[in-house]
Image (cartoon, rainbow, N blue to C red):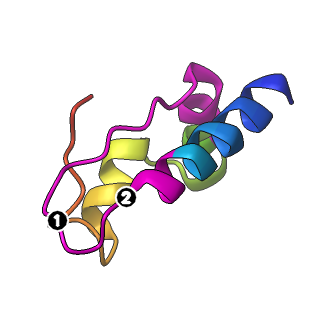
Amino acid sequence: MEEYLELLRDFEIKKRDVDLKSNTKVAITVPPSLFAVVQDVTKLSLQENLQASEFGETVCDCF
């Protein structure tokens, strides 16, 4: 739960700092536990899920 709240806080901070007129990349740290949860629920890795999503072309896979 603590990692989840930290992820939400980090996301909110990044969201407030984003300039919509800029092409700057935004990095978000994903807790290791999220990788395991995604794998358990979807039977695919987080990276595979991102690539298969509508955001697959825009999300950098910096895993």
Question: Could you tell me if the residues under marks 1 and 2 are in contact, i.e. CB atoms within 8 Å?
Answer: yes
At x 17%, y 65%, the residue is 22
At x 83%, y 24%, the residue is 2
- Between 24 and 61, the one lying in front of the other is 24
The residue where tag 2 is placed is: 18
On the image, the x and y values in percent for residue 40 come to 64, 40
Secondary structure beneath dot 2 equals loop
Residue 12 is inside the magenta segment = no
Instruction: Indicate the amino acid at tag 2.
Output: Val
Dot 2 crowding, Cα within 10 Å, few <14, some 14–19, many 20+ = few
Asked where in the image residue 61 lies, by quadrant, the reply is: top left
The quarter in which the C terminus is drawn is top left
The quarter in which the N terminus is drawn is top right
Residue 28 is inside the magenta segment = yes
Instruction: Indicate the amino acid at tag 1.
Output: Ser
Asked where in the image residue 50 lies, by quadrant, the reply is: bottom left
Q: How many tags in the picture?
A: 2
Q: Eyeballing the image, is 24 above or below 56?
A: above
